[in-house]
Amino acid sequence: MTALISRLEAPGFGGASVDLPMQLLGSDGTLTTDHSDGQSSAASLRAFYRDMVLARRFDSEAYNLQRQGELGLWLSCRGQEAAQVGSIRALKSSDHVFPSYREQAAALCRGVTPSELLTQWRGTAHGGWDPRAYRFHIYSLVLATQLLHATGYALGVAADRRKNPELDEIVMCYFGDGSASQGDANEALNWAAVTNAPIVFFCQNNQWAISTPAEAQSRTPLHVRAEGFGLNSTLVDGNDVLAVHAATTAAADRVRAGGPPELIEAVTYRMAGHSTSDDPTRYRDAVEVRLWEGRDPLTRVRRVLDEMGWADDEFHTALDDEAAALAAATRAACTSLEPAPLEATFRNTYVNETSALRTAREEYMAWRESFE
């Protein structure tokens, strides 16, 4: 696909016009590049749209479950589906991914189940899934820690690739604009560049670090800062699933071939609050929200599919039914999650239970049984 220069009035950049070197799907849902390979493009766009619709329905259901008291907290990815689906679908299944804490769309694409995604927020497990099974790490709740974890893991991947040139695994790390202000992020970017670690850093710049706008965090755009560390960087319209996929595919290919680490800054928007404990109306203007609602990533794709004749009523009906089934399965999975017995905490504090913890566990169990 040919990348075209576009302009976007983006809040979070001082209201100034920002060049988006990669935009293949306009805000009005029009394709900005030739898609003469109609069948291939149609199939890809239908698949992306399905991923995005299912991710939004799951995310909305989880949000509602939190409001009903079934989850302790939820961090919505509404509005960021294109950034996540476009990027995760550009990777190989052997690539290892390090998310932050709102990568539900990416996780679902990797096969992580609704039940596994909900356990941490229901308080029934510390993680929720096996990172080795999905090549998708557990969520990191402390800002920017995952960048250092991912860089360290990438150094191990580099060592394995030196021993076995046939291996082509790389690492992807998701983070937000708020995390970019942390020292851990800057250390990770620098160390990855110095060691030529096989890693792609994917920044979802959703304009807000809780209540702090992006323009108040840094006077220099994130992708420009990355170049200062020695990384290749790309700025992309994060609400354009086609552009995100193209940008990530190109970056991953370069890193896989031995090039320097890459950073992709995807300009997107967090439609909900930072979390369900946050009230975004206290710090952002309704006009700004309506502006970004007009750039909804799902609406863009739906318009193209319908206008190009790439999806019919049967496709949309089937997808609606699949989304409804996912919502029902999510509700059932949530209410079926039971907390582990308290004595399990003593066993899980360390890999191997120490004698002191064993004694404490036995004393607790004896105390509990005394009431029975």
Image: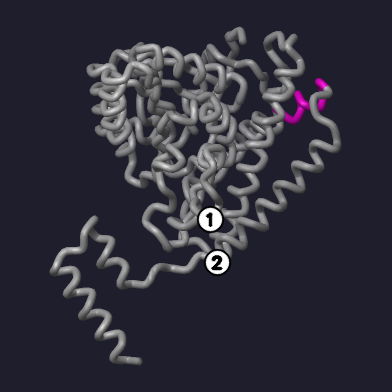
- Label 2 or label 1, whichever comes before in sequence order: 1
Q: Is residue 306 magenta?
A: yes
SS type, badge 1:
helix
Residue 121 vertical placement versus 25 (above, below): below
Q: Residue 38 location in percent, x, y?
A: 76, 15
Residue drawn where x is 32% and y is 45% of the image: 142
Name the residue type under label 2: Ser
Q: CA distance from mark 2 to mark 1?
A: 9 Å
Q: Which residues are magenta?
A: 301-308
Give the quarter of the figure containing the C terminus.
bottom left
Q: Residue 56 location in percent, x, y?
A: 63, 43
Mark 2: few, some, or many residues within 10 Å (few <14, many ≥20)? Answer: few
Residue drawn where x is 24% and y is 79% of the image: 364
Name the residue tied to disc 2.
Answer: 336
* Quadrant in the rendering for residue 79: top right
Name the residue tied to disc 1.
Answer: 115
Identify the disc placed on residue 296.
none
